[in-house]
Image (cartoon, helix red, strand yellow):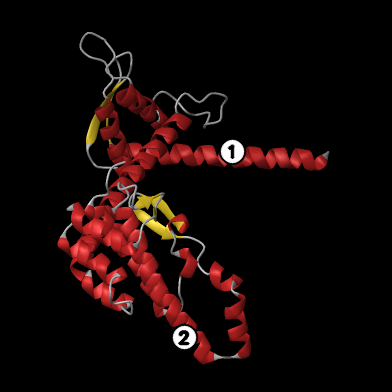
Amino acid sequence: MHPIGENTLWTLTIQLLHAIHAAHSAGLALRDALHPSRLLMTGRNRVRINQVGVADSLDANIARIHAEGDSVGVTQATEAFMKLDVVNFGRIVLALALRTVPTISRGGMLVSSMDTALDGLSRSNMYSNDFVQFVNLLVGSRFDITTLELLQHVAPRMAHEYANTWIHADALEKQLFKEMDASRLLRIATLIGFVNEREGGVLDPSWAETGDNYLLKLLRDYIYHQQDQLGRPVLDYGHVLECLHRLDMGTDEQVLLCGQDNNSLMVASYADLKWCLTQAIQELRKRAATAQDTTWSFHSMQ
């Protein structure tokens, strides 16, 4: 088992601190939810707290105080639980920092006294003085420290975490654009497949080797059936992507299309080819809708 790096520890610590502060700001305490067995890692360095509010629901004493309308008792109990939250938070951070020391931390929980754990953290020399001081704030002499004071203490670290959040957002956005491009190219390639070499008279019977649909056939050959000077097939993935991108955008760039017999040469822009593809797909959709209506009418008469 390897020790957790300090940057990772700060990331987890700040996330937990924000969660605790959100609960305390709402006048609530996390109580038993702040336990190693309640923490969920849902992604890389992303931690969440599970079973929040369960302890309050099962606490008969708290229910009795609420039933009696004892606002002072509720406030005192909540403040005590909030202070305990900070200590439990410190125990979790200590257990994570010293997880490679079996005499202090085992199974994500402290198995030694708090003083022994703090002394072990100071002697480990694995973490900076800032981190050691922060842990001492959690479980040291100031038992009444609030989450707001703790947030002020980690403010410089929060700026680093904020920057990392934007870096992560940029990476997700980049991946999203990749998926969007892939889906657009798949769509345009699928539309070409719907139109080309379709048999059974689904398209207009006047379709001919000189019509608009013939341009799509030549385009299909231009994109997928390239050959070199010796007649060998060319498998150029970049060429396919470039053509599909330009067809999807409908650019004014012109392309020379050649039939497989090398006797037919036609020049067309990607904008014209996109228009031809759109018209062919619309015709297919009309025929498909007509076929469905005919089938429905036949079943209705039976």
Label 2 vs label 1, nearer the camera: 2
Q: Secondary structure at mark 1?
A: helix
Which mark is first along the chain, 1 or 2? 2
Instruction: Please tell me whether residue 223 is drawn above or below residue 100 in the rendered image.
Output: above
Residue 199 appears at what percent x and percent y?
53, 23
Mark 1 nearby-residue class (10 Å; few <14, some 14–19, many ≥20): few
- Residue type at mark 2: give it: Gln
- Residue type at mark 1: give it: Ala
Instruction: Please tell me whether residue 151 is drawn above or below residue 274 in the rendered image.
Output: below
Is 274 displayed left or right of 72 in the figure?
Answer: left
Residue 241 appears at what percent x and percent y?
29, 33
Name the residue that disc number 2 marks. Answer: 76
Q: Which corner quadrant of the image does residue 70 belong to?
A: bottom right
- Which image quarter is the N terminus in? top left
Front in this rendered view, residue 288 or 72: 72
Is 163 displayed left or right of 91 in the figure?
Answer: left
Name the residue that disc number 1 marks. Answer: 288
| C-alpha span from label 2 to label 1 | 72 Å
- Which image quarter is the C terminus in? top right
Please report contact status of discs 2 and 1: CB closer than 8 Å, yes or no: no
Front in this rendered view, residue 90 or 110: 110
Q: At 22% from the left edge and 54% from the top edge, which residue is drawn?
A: 6
Residue 238 appears at what percent x and percent y?
25, 29
